[in-house]
């Protein structure tokens, strides 16, 4: 967003598959901010609305469901801004299972 916008340096656009996941992503970001002793400026939206926003001053995080992301179409609206894409690491739970995939239960012997 640098050079295109005067209100932030970065937009982070995320698409999630459910309101529960939207809330989990938002909570996770806020938890990490607390750990790093970083305050966020504001929050908008609700998981049920399909859109959450976290204003972190220089970074604005948008968490969308697929329908809201298509409707708001921020990718097109801010197409003049340079784009960065990066692969996401799969989160591994404390039990050692990847949270984005269901794994079969292993039998104990």
Image (tube, helix red, strand yellow):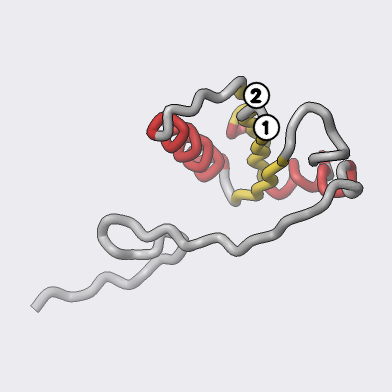
The residue at the far top in this view is 41
Check residue 93 in the rendering and tell me which mark sits there, or answer none.
Answer: none
Q: Nearer the viewer, residue 80 or 96?
A: 80
Residue 27 rendering spot, x and y as whole percentages: 46, 35
Displayed quadrant of residue 8: top right
Say what secondary structure mark 2 lies in. Answer: strand
Q: Are marks 1 and 2 in contact (CB under 8 Å)?
A: no
Residue for point 67% across, 32% down? 58
Of badges 1 and 2, the one in the foreground is 1
Q: Quadrant of the C terminus?
A: bottom left
Check residue 44 in the rendering and tell me which mark sits there, or answer none.
Answer: 2
| Labels 1 and 2: the sequence-earlier one | 2
Residue 92 rendering spot, x and y as whole percentages: 37, 60
The residue at the far front in this view is 3
Q: Is 62 left or right of 24, judged from the image as shown? A: right
Q: Nearer the viewer, residue 76 or 46?
A: 76
Name the residue beneath numbered marker 1: 58
Residue for point 47% across, 62% down? 90
- Judge the density around disc 2: few (<14), some (14-19), many (≥20) Cα neighbours within 10 Å: few
């Amino acid at each position: 967003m640098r050079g295109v916008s005067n209100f932030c340096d970065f937009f982070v656009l995320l698409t999630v598959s459910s309101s529960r996941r939207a809330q989990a992503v938002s909570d996770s970001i806020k938890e990490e901010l607390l750990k790093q002793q970083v305050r966020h400026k504001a929050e908008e939206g609700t998981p049920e609305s399909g859109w959450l926003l976290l204003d972190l001053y220089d970074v604005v995080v948008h968490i969308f469901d697929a329908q809201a992301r298509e409707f708001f179409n921020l990718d097109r609206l801010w197409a003049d801004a340079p784009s960065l894409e990066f692969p996401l690491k799969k989160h591994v739970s404390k039990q050692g299972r990847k949270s984005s995939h269901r794994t079969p239960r292993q039998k104990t012997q």
